[in-house]
Image (tube, rainbow, N blue to C red):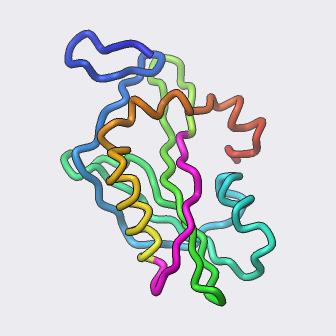
């Protein structure tokens, strides 16, 4: 990781890692297990009937897509887990990096509660303002494919 010469933003192999000034997300929609991150699938292993949902995340300032919240909810227990996930592309090389937080568990009344609680946890830890601190945990596309995280 290097400091960007112009404004102090971090870059990962030439791709800027820009702090987000705030985010918002769209409605939750179902998605298939084949598109889920391996860590989310491991977390819900053995929970029969857990529903998978995703919501696209946008940067509040620019309106650009910047990731998604993937959640799994178990209606029988009212347990839900969620994670923030972002796919980063290096423009020069075309390399894709998959940045995902660990799945976090919460009790919920409505599936949207899980997204709100994950967002609050990440906001409280200043995750979105300090994305450069988290890019050390980004996988290359080859690593993600080897772990089954890119389908």
- Looking at the image, which residue is at 80% across and 72% down? 46
Name the quarter where the N terminus is drawn: top left
Residue 78 at what x, y percent from top left? Answer: 57, 85
Q: Is residue 110 magenta?
A: yes
Residue range of the region highlighted in magenta in the rendering: 99-111
Q: Residue furthest right?
A: 46
Count of numbered labels shown in the rendering: 0
139 vs 120, nearest the viewer: 120
Describe residue 31's horizontal placement relative to residue 68 as left or right. Answer: right
**Vertically, is 7 above or below 150?**
above
Residue most extreme to the bottom: 76
- Residue 137's x, y, as percent? 56, 32
Q: Depth check: 42 or 88 in front?
A: 42
Would you place residue 116 above or below residue 83 in this image?
A: below
Does the stretch in magenta take in 68? no
Q: Residue furthest top?
A: 5
Q: Residue at x 31, y 32 (%)?
A: 18
Q: Nearer the viewer, residue 120 or 63?
A: 120
- Quadrant assignment, res 35: bottom right
- Image location (x, y in percent) of residue 150: 68, 44
Instruction: Name above or below for residue 119 compared with residue 151.
Output: below
Direction from residue 17 to residue 22 in the image, left or right: left
Question: Residue shown at 28%/49% (left/top)?
Answer: 59
Residue in the image at 48% along x and 16% along y: 13
């Amino acid at each position: 990781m290097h400091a960007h010469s112009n404004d102090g933003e971090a870059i990962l192999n030439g791709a800027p890692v820009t702090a987000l000034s705030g985010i918002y997300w769209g409605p939750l929609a179902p998605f298939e297990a084949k598109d889920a991150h391996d860590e989310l699938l491991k977390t819900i292993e053995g929970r029969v009937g857990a529903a998978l949902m995703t919501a696209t995340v946008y940067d509040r300032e620019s309106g650009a897509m910047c990731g998604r919240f993937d959640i799994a909810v178990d209606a029988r227990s009212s347990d839900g887990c969620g994670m923030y996930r972002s796919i980063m592309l290096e423009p020069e090389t075309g390399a894709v990096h998959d940045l995902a937080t660990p799945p976090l568990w919460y009790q919920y009344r409505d599936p949207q509660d899980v997204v709100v609680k994950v967002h609050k946890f990440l906001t409280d830890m200043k995750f979105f303002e300090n994305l450069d601190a988290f890019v050390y945990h980004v996988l290359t596309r080859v690593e993600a494919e080897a772990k089954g995280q890119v389908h």
